[in-house]
Image (cartoon, grey):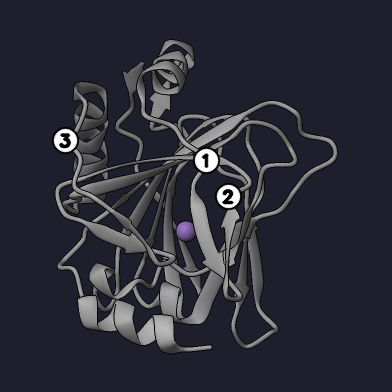
Amino acid sequence: MIVSSQNPEIIDLPDGRLRYVSSLLTETDALIHRLTTSLNWYQGDVFLFGRHHKTPRLQCWYGDKAYTYSQVRLEPTPWPPLLQQLRTIVEEASGHAFNSVLGNWYQHGQHNMGMHADNEPELGQNPVVAMLTFGTARPLQFRHRNGVDRFTIIPEDGSLLIMEGPIQHYWRHGIHKSKTISAPRISLTFRQILSVNHAHTARRQSKK
Ligand SMILES: [Mn+2]
């Protein structure tokens, strides 16, 4: 793995901003192997429309504080040295601090991520989410809640994509299934969790 000092490309969207470094990391093959073999991957649960579902991808989670994600509480987990190293690289490249990382492993084209916003209350008002991508490039779709504006970026192997500003209020993002892509993609999304809000979790569970 080689770390570049490439300047980010700034992508201004209506009501949000992305910064993109297309090849922050190069020669990633050994790194990808270490990520797939050493991290604690599992098929997660999500709570949608009143039911628990298995996520159509593998996930892993490491963080200093507990995080409640789609009504599933993730307990604090120590950082493996590899993720610690990547966190430092992402913090230096983005200028932001992160205390957690959510990994997603899309093993083939049928693995996907539904449209969503990273707007959990623990992430604060305008969260910064920094995404490292490894392996196959898959389109990341952005849709504005106004129903009109759309944007697609295809983060490349070794790239860093930073979502910041009010983007999580106005836009949702996701990764569609693909019939043509069969090779895997891994993303590591670094976040800063401010605190756990039990009151919010209780309110959500009572909401239909
Ligand atoms: Mn997300």
**Pointer 3 or 2: first along the chain:** 2
Q: In percent of the image, x 38 and y 72: which residue is there?
A: 119
State which mark lies toward you, 3 or 1.
1
**Do the residues under discs 3 and 1 have CB atoms within 8 angstroms?**
no
Residue 184 location (% of width, % of height): 63, 28
Depicted 48 relative to depicted 14: above or below: above
Q: In percent of the image, x 24 and y 74: which residue is there?
A: 124
Question: Number of labelled discs?
Answer: 3
Residue 16 sits in quarter = bottom left
- In the picture of the structure, the residue carrying the numbered disc 2 is 55
Q: In percent of the image, x 16 and y 51: which residue is there?
A: 97
Circle 1: residue type = Gln
Residue 14 in view in this figure: no
Residue 80 location (% of width, % of height): 21, 26
**Pointer 3 or 1: first along the chain:** 1
- In the picture of the structure, the residue carrying the numbered disc 3 is 78
Circle 3: residue type = Pro
Secondary element at image label 1: loop
The residue nearer to you, when weighing 101 against 157, is 101
Q: Residue furthest right?
A: 179
Image quadrant containing the N terminus: top left
Q: CA distance from mark 3 to mark 1?
A: 20 Å
Secondary element at image label 3: loop
Q: Residue furthest top?
A: 30
**Pointer 1 or 2: first along the chain:** 1
Residue 33 location (% of width, % of height): 46, 14
Q: Which mark is residue 90?
A: none
Depicted 97 relative to depicted 80: above or below: below
**Do the residues under discs 1 and 2 have CB atoms within 8 angstroms?**
yes
Q: Which mark is residue 43?
A: 1
Q: CA distance from mark 3 to mark 2?
A: 23 Å
Q: CA distance from mark 1 to mark 2?
A: 6 Å
